Amino acid sequence: MTYETIRLDIADGIATITLNRPERLNAMSVEMGDELSDALLHLDGARALLITGEGRAFCSGADLAARGERSVGGGDGAYRALTRCYNPLMLALAKLPMPIVTAVNGPAAGIGCSLALAGDFVITGESGYFLQAFVNIGLVPDGGATWMLPRLIGKARATEMMMLGEKIGGAKAADWGLVHKCVADDALLGEARALTARLAAGPTIAFAQMRRNILIALESDYGSGMQAEAEGQRIAGSSRDAMEGGMAFLQKRKAAFEGR
């Protein structure tokens, strides 16, 4: 697929997806959603993923100006866009077998907020903000927001974000525990790339099992969570990286993980 609304670059084990509709503040069209889903199927050679936005925004939300068959707006159009495009995209991100870092420059609103929070590590610039704007236009949060937000920041703050529809700035988001950290705008991409590079050099199979087990733990009981850990340990423990990690520990040196 030729991408028109995103860029995909893979180098040194790092995949970088850049939302690339700066003239629309990277508003999420169905085309962008489809391209993102396709990009996730073509990450060969990558061991970690960085997602950011071009220009002044991460993603300003769904493109409500779209018209026709692929419109996002309107009850039926929104339902189709969510069930056929955005929900499968969010599930694919959740199940991706590698760590995800999101670098939030400017607004992350609506579906863009959900996309930003899909990162294992969310780093925001000081000018970044998170907004559940749906209430301001008589709609309800989507893209997994009503599942994510109470788990990330608790019911009271999640309700505040969704029912009041006010911006949560980068510093406040970090204070709430909504994001990993807030940094100066000019340091954002450098911090995000450094963290992504660190993850890309780590034990990829173990990371994949960690992501899977966290997702299972959010939805299961204590015993089921421990069973998932045991299964994940069996998979990770059979990897070449686990062997390397054990040898490095015994030899008192830094492990050189290969992602295998």
Image (cartoon, rainbow, N blue to C red):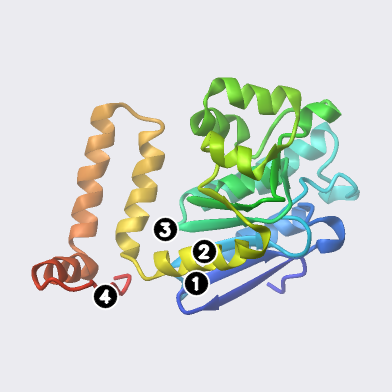
Which residue type does callout 2 highlight? Leu
| Quadrant in which the N terminus is drawn | bottom right
**Which of the labelled discs sits on residue 14, or is there none?**
1
Cβ atoms under marks 1 and 3 closer than 8 Å: no
Residue identified by numbered label 2: 49
Residue, disc 3: 97
Distance between the Cα atoms at labels 1 and 3?
A: 13 Å
Question: Going by the image, does 153 lie left or right of 200?
Answer: right
Residue 246 in the image: state x and y as whole percent.
13, 66
Q: Are marks 4 and 2 in contact (CB under 8 Å)?
A: no
Q: Residue at x 34, y 66 (%)?
A: 202
Query: Mark 1 or mark 3: which is in front?
Result: 1
Q: Name the foreground residue: 202 vs 87.
A: 202
Q: Are marks 2 and 1 in contact (CB under 8 Å)?
A: yes
Kindly identify which numbered label has been placed on residue 256: 4
Residue type, label 1? Ile
